[in-house]
Amino acid sequence: MLLSFIYDLSTWSSILLIVSLLSVCFFEAINGFHDTANAVATVIYTKALKPQVAVVWSGFMNFVGVFFGGVVMAWIMGLFGGNADTSGIGVAMGIVKLMPVNEMLGSGISETVSLVLAVLFAAIAWNLGTWYYGIPCSSSHTLIGSLLGAGLAFSLGHPKSTVNWQKAQEIGMSLLISPLFGFTLAVLLMYMMRVFIKSKVIFKEPDTKKAPPFWIRLVLLLTCTLVSFFHGSNDGQKGVGLLLVVMMAFMPLQFAFNPDIDTAKLKAAAVELGETLKNAAVVDDTHAPVLLAHAANSAKLVARLDTLNRSNKDQLIATRIDIQNLNKGINSAIKDGFIVDKGQKSIIKHNSSILAQTYEFAPFWSILMISICLGIGTMIGWKRIVVTIGEKIGKTHLTYAQGASAELCAAATIGVSTGLGLPVSTTHVLSSGIAGTMVAEGGVKNLQRKTIRNIAIAWLLTLPVAFIAGFLFYFVFKMFV
């Protein structure tokens, strides 16, 4: 399918597309081996698994996580009544929403490709550099910083284009809070384990001449599996989001608007949405003008869908923007409490989610491609970061309890973030969890200051460095593309 799309492009555009796709794959592979330590360091340093077995297993679970992680967490959070993303690709869409996609669709190929390559090259450069020096660094911070920098550079030439600072702030808070949450949770979990678990062996340095107790090995294998799975579900989706932006840039006719969604289904959703909004306006006189305005926009959308020509790029993009604006207005109305009836609110949300499928979708082959790249990347280049996490964060050797606590905290934090559709830093969550377990066992003095300082410096510098690199790379590529 992908080859048939490339066949329709000019030679130069095809070359640029292939370079962009390879860059996405390379970024995701680096993400894999850069973040592998987050899952395998604890099982390796507690002798629960041999390095080769741990890395291959982690790679496989990363692969599986890209496919099923988002859907699984949305389902779990739905059971507990959480406000979960139900598309299963919420993290990918979060990355897409950071970029001025609608403006990119109406721009020339040179500007669009410059934007995409600037993001990828800035992220790859910083990730490779920190990996080379064995510094745990967030691929999420790197990617988002480069997205914002390149997006700002693009917007300078497009007055109507703006960086989605609101979405950036939302993601930024997730990236900021998650390490603090991981650290605190790890400390509490270690204290609880001290109180409720009588076995002393899990709190001692592993004996290199003896195999770990079976139940401990089972727990550590489970935590390694969970971190790997949820890492795939979160970080893998970031690659899917990048890939979708690339495909929209080169082939807007095929990827700006979901080609597999039935127009009749969209039309039925828009009709029911409009009728429900009118009924809601009757219930709430105060906010009736706003609700009726949204109902009128639904009616306009129905009329547009009646005459939609899917082979017309301008019509597809205009319809996409209309649906996005309508959904944005509806979501604001729900958030502000304009719709009070629960039944009406449920109907409106349901139909809004159907309309959102026009621009929130990921083809099967794109998920497969990213999951393979992430899985392969996980199996190589892992040792540098593993050594840092396993040996250099704390002054004492990692115990069974510390390994299990840190990974349980990381898996929980990453899983919840995936369910909410928010990118999160696997690296910072787990390294802060390891630090938390070390503090729980021996206080702050049990931390190696040099390593903590390097990680903290990288944490502080990643966003601004990636931002500046993305900004500058955009103008560099614009001169040559």
Image (cartoon, rainbow, N blue to C red):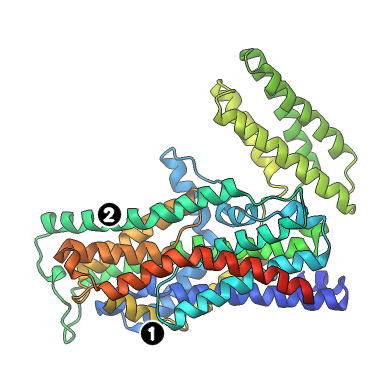
Is 127 above or below relative to 359? Answer: below
- x, y percent for residue 141: 50, 63
Q: Secondary structure at mark 1?
A: helix
- x, y percent for residue 15: 79, 78
Give the residue type that dot 1 points to: Gln
* Residue under pointer 2: 184
| Residue 42 relative to residue 274: left or right | left
Q: Earlier in the sequence, mark 1 or mark 2?
A: 1
* Residue under pointer 1: 52
Image quadrant where residue 239 sits:
bottom right
Can you see residue 310? no
Give the residue type that dot 2 points to: Thr
Image quadrant where residue 113 sits:
bottom right
- x, y percent for residue 54: 37, 78
Using the numbered discs, state the Cα–Cα distance from disc 1 to disc 2 in whole angstroms. Answer: 31 Å
Q: Residue at x 24, y 74 (%)?
A: 448
Q: Secondary structure at mark 2?
A: helix
